[in-house]
Image: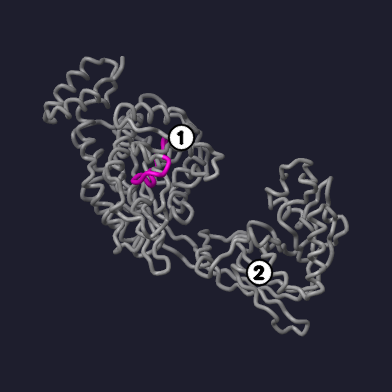
Amino acid sequence: MKDFSNFYYKILSRLGLSLSCALFFLAITLNAQSSVTSYENGSVYHYSQFITKADIKKHITLLASDSLEGRAFGTKGAFKASEYIASQLRYENINAKGDRGTYFQPMVITKWMREKSDFQILNQSGSTKYEMVSGKDFTYNIADLGTTTNLSGDHLMFAGFGIMDEKYNDYQYAQVRNEVVMFLEGEPSKDGKYIISGTNQPGKWSKDLKAKIEVAVQKGARAVFILVDSTRFAYRTKEQLATNIIYKDVLKQNYPIPVIRINKNALAQMLLPREYKRINKYISNAQKGKISSNYISSFFKVNLVSSSTQIRDRNVVASIEGTDPELKNEYIVVSAHYDHIGIINGEIYNGADDNGTGTSALLTLAKAMKALQDNKFVFKRSVLFLFCTGEEVGLIGSKYYTENPIVPLKDTKIEINIDMIGRNDEDHEANENYVYVIGSDKINPLLDLVIRENNSRSVNYKLDYTYNDLNHPLRLYYRSDHYNFAELGIPSVFFFGGFHKDYHQATDDTYLINTTKVEDITKLVYFTVIDLANKPGEILTKYKSN
C-alpha cells in the first residue's frame, strides 16, 4: 500500500490546521495502514519539527565566528568549538559517551613539519655557488624522506626515464650502485606513440612512480632526483610549504630511499655550461627512445630535516541508548567534523559551510532524537553522535576513533556522515533541493534503500550520485570521515551539498548559508537514522578488524 501519511501531514499543515489537529488526522491514517512500520507515527513527525532553521543558524553563527579563529586542528579555536558542542549536548541532557563520563575523546598526535631545507650547489673548492630554493628549484614531500636526509657528491647518474622493461631499459649500460640517480618523469615516445605500449596511451611507467623507485632501489641507488618539466613543476611559496604537514606517531618513508623533485629549469644553476649542454642532449635522446644514461658532473650538498611536536585535540561523543534486549548494543553512528583550516596569512577562515553546517545539523539532530526518546519513543538500537576533529588535515579524528573505538566496531552497523550541506553548486542553480549521496550502496544496499524510502516520504530531495563513483576524479568517497568506517567494511554514507567558490576561502561565512537546505537534509538524516535504529532483523556489515 502506498504511504500517504506524510502527504496528509503536509496538506493539513498548508491548510493552516494546528499541529495537534494534523497529528489527529495523521493518527487515523496510520491506524488504517496496518503495513506502516512503527516509526511512522505522529510523535516521530512532531519531533522532527525540533530541527529548526533558528537553531541551525544559532549554532553556525557561533561556530563560524571570528572568536573561534577558524577552528584549526589542535588550536584554541578548536578547543572552544568542542566546549560549545559539549555544552549544547549537556544542556539537552544527551548521554555523554567520552572518557571518564565526559563528552570528550582526547588524543595526542605527532605533527611533522619541515625544519631545514638546504640544497647547495658547490664550486670544486667546496664553497657555495648557488642555494637551491625550496618550492622553486626543488620540492619534496616530508614522507618521501624521513626525518633527516644528508646527501653530497660530485656527480649524478642520469638514467633517462628510470625504466627497466623488456622493450626499453634505461639501466642497460648504467651502473648506479651507491649513486644519486636522476631521471625524467613519464616514458619515451616516438611518432606519437609510446615506445613501450606501442599505442598513444602511456603505460605503468607514467602512472606508477613507485615502479621506477623500486627499480632504482634494486639497482642500489642511494637517492632519486626526478626531473620535472617547468610547466608541471609544483611551485610553492614559503607559506605553502609550511602547510606540508604530516600527522603520524612515527614518520615512515614512502620509499626506501630519499626522493626529491628537481625543476628542469634549475639544471642551468646545478651544472657547469658544458655539463648542462651534455644533459640536454641526453634528455633529447631519451625522449626519442634512445638509451642515454651517463654520469653528469655536479657538486652538491643536501641537508633536509623534519621536526615534530605533540598536538592535543579531541572528538566529542554522545549517544542515545537503545532498549531492545538483543539490539541495544548495536549502534548507528552519525558524524560531522567540526574543525576547519584556521588562520592563513592573517585571515580567519571561518568555515561556515565547511563544516559549521554539518556540526549544526548533528547538534539539532541529537536534540530532536533526545526529545523523541523522552516522549517514550523506543529506540531498539543505540545511536552514537560523533563530532570529529582533524578532518581537514587527513581525517585524523575519525581515524583515531576507529583505532580507539568507544563502542565495538563489530557492533557498529551503519555510519552516516554530514559534511558541507548549506550551499548549492553550479550544477544545481535551478534546483536547490538536492543532496549528493556518496557511498550508500557500496557495502550493504540496505542503507541506500532506506535513504531513498525516507527521502520520498519526507523532504523529497533529488539524490545526486555523481560523486558516488569510486573512480571519480575528485575521489570524494575517500575524502571525508565516513571513509575510515567504510574502509573497515561498515556500511557508510556521506551527505554533501557540493563545492562552491567559497570552499576553503576566507569568504565561507554564515550569511551565505541556506538554512532551509540544512534543515531539510538534517530531517532526512533524522528519519533515516530512526528507521535504521528500529529496523528488525540483522543489518549486515563486512567488518574486518583494523
The kind of residue on which mark 1 rests is Tyr
Magenta part of the protein: which range?
413-427
- Residue 403 at least partly seen: yes
Is 377 above or below relative to 170?
A: above
Point 70% across, 61% down: residue = 226
Q: What residue appears at the point 68 percent right and 76 percent down from the top-left corner?
A: 120
Looking at the picture, how far across and down is residue 21, in whole percent? Answer: 11, 26
Split into 4 quadrants, where in the image is the N terminus? top left
Where is residue 213 drawn, in percent x and y?
Answer: 72, 55
Disc 2 to disc 1: CB gap under 8 Å: no
* Amino acid type assigned to the residue bearing label 2 in the image: Thr
Question: Which residue is pictured at 31% across the width and 45% down the height?
Answer: 362
Label 1: element kind: loop
Per the image, the residue denoted by label 1 is 465
Distance, label 2 to label 1, CA atoms, is 45 Å
Q: Position of residue 3 (x, y in %)?
A: 29, 20
Q: Which residue is mark 2?
A: 149
Question: Which picture quadrant has residue 536?
Answer: top left
Above or below, 497 against 306 in this view is: above
- The percent position of residue 129, horizontal first and vertical second, equals 70, 81
Q: Nearer the viewer, residue 503 or 368?
A: 503
Helix or strand or loop: what does disc 2 sit on?
strand
